[in-house]
Image (tube, helix red, strand yellow):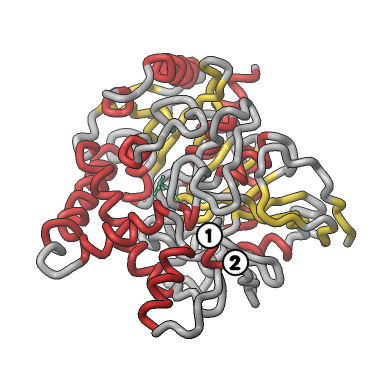
Amino acid sequence: MGIFAFSAPDPCNAFITRIPEAEYGDGKLAGVSIAVKDNISTKGIPTTCGSKILEGYIPPYDAHVVELLRAEGAAIVGKTNMDEFGMGTTTENSAYGPTLNPADRERVPGGSSGGSAAAVASGMVAMALGTDTGGSIRCPAAFCGIVGMKPTYGRVSRYGLVAYANSLEQIGPMAANVPDISLLLQVLTCHDPRDSTSITAPYTHTPDPDIHGLKVGVPEEYFGKGVDPRVASIVWEGISLLERLGAEIITCRMPSMDYALAAYYVTCMSEASSNLARFDGVRYGPPADPKKQWHESFQERRRDGFGKEVRRRVMLGTFALSSGYYGKYYAKAQSARRNVAADFSRLFSEVDVLAGPTMPTIAFRVGEKSDPLSMYLSDILTVPANLAGVPAISVPCGKVDGMPVGLQIMGRWCADERVIDVAYAFEEGVSA
Ligand code: GLN
């Protein structure tokens, strides 16, 4: 037992709330400083989701993952900045100001778990928790030069996570290297009856870097239109390193990629419109005029409490679910989603893992993605793993223009162990 004095400066605005004297205990993570994304409930510590609408909210309970961290002795030193409710790829959509990239403060750290990534990359904390609905752990890990993993859907309990799009999202580990990711995942995977999608598949693995004979599929679409050629070439070099380490490289096709992004955005906005309906602004958030009629003040509180991107998604999601349009948008998105899952199962009957870039480009400049569609397009390489529920990791793979690039490894459903082994082999190979 002890107290972790957390006084590191935060020039990148990685934190929304800091705990200057964090308690820790005994266990696998005794005294390890961990930052938690601010959409994960922490008893007695404000949880804002990067939104004004939750201003003043202090959860009365811990999320399952936070209970597990505390039980293993971690020092939870604060709550990290994020795009409001997880909606974004830059951590600029936060009511608490943008987070900046520690490698270049004129650039974004990626999102939506940008605060967690910046906190790890700048050495403020040893490890962090993020959440990944469509890439929000892997994108900032790639942009900041750290490791981040989205585990198999269901392997980590979402109890206590403020939902954005339930059918897609997972809580996952972010750290400076693969063994730390593995250690944190050992702590986080535990069946939880309070999350109905929780599966019983504890991760007890120790990373093994031997990848001789492993089949690595490389989908051509991961090097297609929109991928910066400099990023493509450095990731190809990374893939050749896997080959030198004994893996067999097989190029393949993922035709469902044509519709993956549209399927993702229709699905996540639909789920968001339903999830966010609970925020009426009555107990938390900016106060409303008590003399106004209920429906007026409700509208006002939601208008003032939510940022622009959240309002856009709630409206589009409500539209996609409305009668008369449901079949055209939501139902169609679900059939495109099934095609993505079918592509993965076909490919995973031929190869062990899939590899490609995590993001099509390096970190954007602050303010560069002012048009929402161009920001959405940058999620094209990360959303397939969420649509199919399979595990995926981003591991640092060199630099372009001084900015980090991530190599993404995706695996079969519940083969998180294998994904970690390949990432570990790569990490060891790079430093050899
Ligand atoms: N950028 C994607 C979105 O805005 C992914 C976000 C996430 O994974 N939370 O929905």
Q: Judge by depth and name the residue closer to the eye, 50 or 37.
A: 50
Distance of label 1 from label 2 (alpha carbons): 7 Å
Say which residue label 2 marks: 55
x%, y% of residue 41?
60, 66
Q: Quadrant of residue 253?
A: top left
x%, y% of residue 378?
37, 35
Labels 1 & 2 near each other (Cβ < 8 A): yes
Dot 2: within a 10 Å radius of its alpha carbon, few (fewer than 14), some, or many (20 or more) residues? Answer: some
- Write the residue at 73% across / 43% down: 126
x%, y% of residue 83?
50, 50
Dot 1: within a 10 Å radius of its alpha carbon, few (fewer than 14), some, or many (20 or more) residues? Answer: many
Along the horizontal axis of the image, is 406 left or right of 103? left
Along the horizontal axis of the image, is 144 left or right of 298? right
Three-letter code, disc 2: Glu
Three-letter code, disc 1: Ser
Q: Quadrant of residue 2?
A: bottom right
- Write the residue at 43% across / 56% down: 169
Name the residue at the front extreme: 291
Q: Is residue 137 visible?
A: yes
Q: For the residue labelled by badge 2, is the local secondary structure a helix, a strand or a loop?
A: loop
Say which residue label 1 marks: 51
Q: Is residue 184 above or below residue 178?
A: below
